[in-house]
Amino acid sequence: MKLVYTHPSNIVVAQARASLELAGIKCGLRNEYAAGAMGELAPIDVWPELWVLRDRDYERAALLLAQSHAEIQEEDWHCPHCGSQSPATFELCWHCAGDRSPGNNPHGA
Ligand SMILES: [Zn+2]
């Protein structure tokens, strides 16, 4: 078993667990009752912990969690095709509908 994620909120750890299980990664919680049932934060030494049951899943799990974090914290991006700024939640440029990654120009450049 490997510790892959910890956070003072039960809810956040439970969400992380759900996204890993969705990806077929078996995991378990520790200290899940340390935090209050009403979403209170646990003291730092007893944060709820998320463990992957198989060590070989660890890297994939860490990557998945890093990606889901990145989505939340992502900042505005600049369109590689027209230079317009779009919010992080947009997959396509609001201005020219171009893809975020330079390799996928919808106009076939
Ligand atoms: Zn654009």
Image (tube, grey):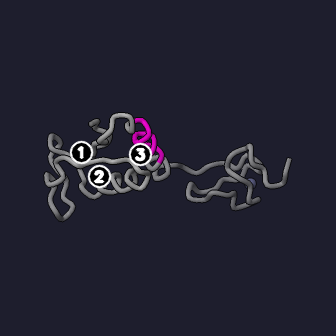
Magenta span: 59-67
- Tell me which image quadrant ligand 1 sits in: bottom right
Question: Could you tell me residue 101's position as x and y percent?
Answer: 68, 46
Pointer 2 local density, CA inside 10 Å: few below 14, some 14–19, many at least 20: many
Task: Say whether residue 25 is left or right of residue 105.
Answer: left
As drawn, the residue found furthest toward the bottom would be 38
- Identity of the residue drawn at 38% across and 34% down: 56
Question: Could you tell me residue 3's position as x and y percent?
Answer: 28, 38
Question: Is 22 a magenta residue?
Answer: no
Q: Is mark 3 within 8 Å of ligand 1?
A: no
Q: Is mark 1 within 8 Å of ligand 1?
A: no
What is the distance, in whole Å, between disc 1 and disc 2 at their CAs?
7 Å
Task: Say whether residue 45 is left or right of residue 49.
Answer: left
Q: Which residue is mark 1?
A: 49
Q: Secondary structure at mark 2?
A: helix
Total marks drawn?
3
Question: Could you tell me residue 92's position as x and y percent?
Answer: 67, 58
